[in-house]
Amino acid sequence: MNKDTQMRAAINQKLIETGERERLKEVLRVKCGWKGQLKAHWKEVIKEKGLEHVTVDDLEAEVAPKGRALVPDGVKKELLRRRRTFLTQHASL
């Protein structure tokens, strides 16, 4: 595992341990209905490809770009600000 991957894993673990990851996800749910829109897109992809022919990798490839595009710029900026604040407060990672 390279240093970048290790750092990402450590940050993600700290986000989970502190509950910040869930708070960030809540911002997405409340501010832009992101989860519901993605769920509808997942269903569409599964229906189009057929349940027996779709893989997790297929879903990720189809849904991830749309998920990023669905988040309004204002919400992206807020999430980025909150992550920076979190990292500043937990600089010992």
Image: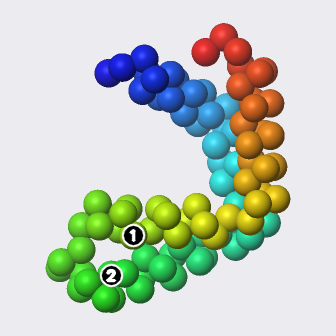
Q: CA distance from mark 2 to mark 1?
A: 10 Å
Q: Residue furthest top?
A: 92
Q: Of the numbered discs in the image, which one, if any, rests on residue 46?
A: 2
Q: Percent x, y for residue 27?
A: 75, 57
SS at mark 1 in the image: helix
Residue at image coords 35%, 68%: 59
Question: Within the image, what quadrant is residue 16 found in?
Answer: top right
> Which amino acid type is marked by label 1?
Glu
Q: Is residue 69 above or below residue 75?
A: below
Question: Which residue is at the front of the view, 15 or 53?
Answer: 53
Q: Earlier in the sequence, mark 2 or mark 1?
A: 2
Q: Nearer the viewer, residue 80 or 14?
A: 80
Residue 20 numbered tag: none
Label 1 sits on residue = 62
Residue depicted at x 78% and y 39%: 82
State the residue at coordinates (60%, 67%).
Answer: 69
